[in-house]
Amino acid sequence: MGLNTTCPVPAGAQDYGVRGTAWIPLVWSAAACSITTIAIALSLVVLHLRRYRAPREQRQIIRIVFCVIVYAVIAFFEVASYEVAQYIDPLGDLYEAFGLCALYLLFLQYAAPSGTFANDDILSAARAAEETTVSFDWVRVGYIFVFQYPITEIFCVILIESTEATGTYCSYSLYPYFGHIWVEIIQSLGIGACVIAILVFRGNMKQRMKVRRGLAKLVCFKIIVFIRFAQAWVFSLLLQYNVIKTSPTFSYNDILWGIPGLATCAEMVLFSLGFWYAFSSTEYGSNAKPRDSPLPLGKALLDVINPMDLISGIARIFPLWGEIHRSGDWAQWRAAIPINRQIRKYRNKKRAGGNVRYEEVRGEGTEELKMPKQSHSRSGSDAFDVEDTPTMGMGGQTLYQPPSGSPPDDASSSLMPEGSLRASSQGQWNGRRYDRSPSPPRGRNPEGMAGYEVV
């Protein structure tokens, strides 16, 4: 039996002129929602342009706010014309990738307000501003994860258009032979890495982001990304497995493009309202920055539409990749992720025969022995705590007090004059393990006084 390479087109899927009776209400509702979204978002954009006092921050804010306009317009045309829907839908994902990069650049400016991208000093400043202790340079690692997403999306757009031209894309099927399932998987990995990197960056800068409403900005944009991503999968799966069936009210394309498009238009109205709080322009007003005069409206608009910072950000990931490899940050990041820690723990346990650490050691006819932790103490009635041990002996002589990191005492250990020392079979403790070098010769110290030492 040969491989079936024919795209299984469902009944009515390519009959773009066949629409259910609900199509006209869908179009008018989508148009009303799109116009409302554009009006709300553009008013916020104009306010930022008139108060353009912090170009490096407001440039990114305007790009993010403009996302809801792009989504609403694309969704409206998908509802209005099913023929072009599959060709313009990837444009929303492409702008989404650059919007997430803009959000990350905005967070970088919040973390390092005086930093610039000249010689990557903003990355070093953001690294120094981290509020959590991380063993590797997460700022640079996260930068790569964020700016790989536009490259991933561009590759997916090319893949979609090329497979559409050869008839091997098949948006109606999730069969592995066709390109649709692979595009969805690649996009999922790309957006997942990008969003996780932004979440971790914000988590490492909580206090700095808190005063700039960083959480509100992240939540607003993250929910948009999640909803668009989830809707694409849900409606594809519902149609794929006949959970939703066509009817005179809703044709196949009404369900595939019409309902999700209208849902997107309605959601953008809500998010455009939320952006008024998350990306408010009041912090750039004359009262907040009285000494800074805003740029003229024309210059501010030209600064916003200049894409060179995004293009240079994408190009920067390649030298950064080599840099973190040379510095060892990439290996440290791999060692720090939870799944790798679990794998190393399992391997160490297997090598130790399953006995990595035991808090209690019991034997027949013996008393309970507890392995010491912070305070090195003996078991039984002779146990003592280092912190409670007297530091002065008879005659005012100072007794030896084990330093932090010294080994646990064995059953025969005791405080003895140096003249009565005997060689230890275990060797000397260096803080991590026993050094089995020969014991020093017995004798008196250079000052002629008898010292005390734990054997």
Image (tube, rainbow, N blue to C red):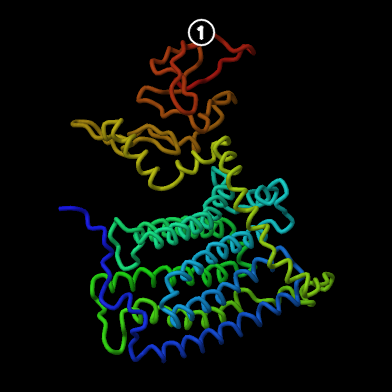
Disc 1 marks which residue? Answer: 441
The residue at 41%/48% (across/down) is 338
Quarter location, residue 13: bottom left
Q: Nearer the viewer, residue 382 or 200?
A: 200
Is 8 displayed left or right of 265 in the figure? left
The amino acid on which the numbered mark 1 sits, given as a three-letter code, is Pro
Is 2 displayed left or right of 199 in the figure? left
Measuring from the top left, give residue 231's x and y in whole percent.
Answer: 39, 72
Is 181 displayed left or right of 225 in the figure? left
Q: Nearer the viewer, residue 185 or 328?
A: 185
Q: Is residue 215 above or below residue 327?
A: below
Q: Quadrant of the C terminus?
A: top left
Give the secondary structure at mark 1: loop
Q: Is residue 261 above or below residue 87?
A: below
Quarter location, residue 7: bottom left
Q: Nearer the viewer, residue 342 or 265?
A: 265
Observer able to see residue 180: no
Measuring from the top left, give residue 319's x and y in whole percent.
Answer: 61, 42
